Image (tube, rainbow, N blue to C red):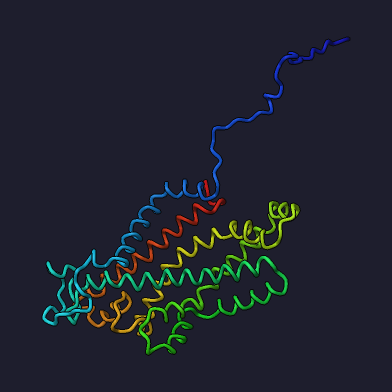
Amino acid sequence: MNSKIEHFVADYDTNLSAVDQFTSDKKVTGLIQEAWSIIIRNPLFWVSSVIVLILASMALFPGLWSQTDPLVCQISDSNLSGSAIHPMGTTLQGCDVFARVVYGARPSLAIGVMTTVIGTLIGVIIGTIAGFFGGILDSILSRVIDVFYAIPFILAAVAVLQLFQSSDSIWKVIFTLSLFAWTSPARLMRSAVLGVKQQEFITASVALGSSQFRNMFMHILPNSISPVIATATINIGGYIVAESTLSFLGLGLGSNSVSWGQDIANARDNLMTTPSMLLWPSLFLAVTTLSFIFLGDSIRDALDPKGRR
């Protein structure tokens, strides 16, 4: 039995090239543009950013928030819980708590930010070198990182600060914290570089004749730095807490300095009689730390392609 098979053939004048055409009105965006479009839709980013901006204005322009000198005290106003002149009360010496909280933001934020910048810069350099070149250099640097990483952070800072007891400068705290703040960024950067340098676009770049240093600075470093930036934002809050802890132990800023940690240390003996002395600097310290943590989480979620929905 014969069966007739029909073939359907397009007309001769049909434009078959249209089948391979693809048109899209979607604008091509880079990593930064795409991350920004994600982060601006995160309400946690806006809340934490507003709080950080307020704290930054207190640190940069404390006179806009309080006209009272935090070091000028009236013993007659000792241990006030709150009044029209002193809304947050006074200390045992009669110092205005609100003024001390406002002016205490400057050293706390300065130490947190500067420690993060210095530690992250050192960590990025060491982590990039270790991950990119590999071999014996990677082994040596990795062991150095492990040794510093294994040292208890606060305990090491306490030991180093014993050498600077006569100084009241914030740079002694920044220097001490930076000595041990680079290990975490270095480990993270090394891991990111090891992953990026195995990507196909790096192989293609080498095949096209790109040099090692060009690959490192133009391709590997920009594509590895994102998680380090996000983690560094979170670490700012941790270093502010570390400074407050050292000041609480009497090893941070001097007794004549104004800082949240120093005020918390001074308030521990008057907790039952004047709790406001401890409440307000502790509250500002907690809010500052949480704001930087939430801000860092928002940035990390936006820069992490695996975490996007």
Which residue is located at x 68 percent, y 74 percent?
139
Which residue is located at x 67 percent, y 65 percent?
132
Which residue is located at x 23 percent, y 64 percent?
65
- Viewer-closest of 131 and 156: 131
- Viewer-closest of 159 and 110: 110
Q: Position of residue 91 (x, y in %)?
A: 20, 78
Residue 255's quadrant in the figure? bottom left
Q: Is residue 28 left or right of residue 252?
A: right
Residue 278's quadrant in the figure? bottom left
Q: Is residue 185 left or right of residue 264?
A: right
Q: Position of residue 136 (x, y in %)?
A: 72, 74
Residue 273's quadrant in the figure? bottom left
Q: Position of residue 69 (x, y in %)?
A: 21, 74
Which residue is located at x 45 percent, y 64 percent?
234
Q: Position of residue 171 (x, y in %)?
A: 41, 79
**Does 225 appear above or below 41?**
below
Q: Which residue ends up furthest to the right in the rendered image? A: 1
Q: Quadrant of the N terminus?
A: top right
**Does 14 appear above or below 129?**
above
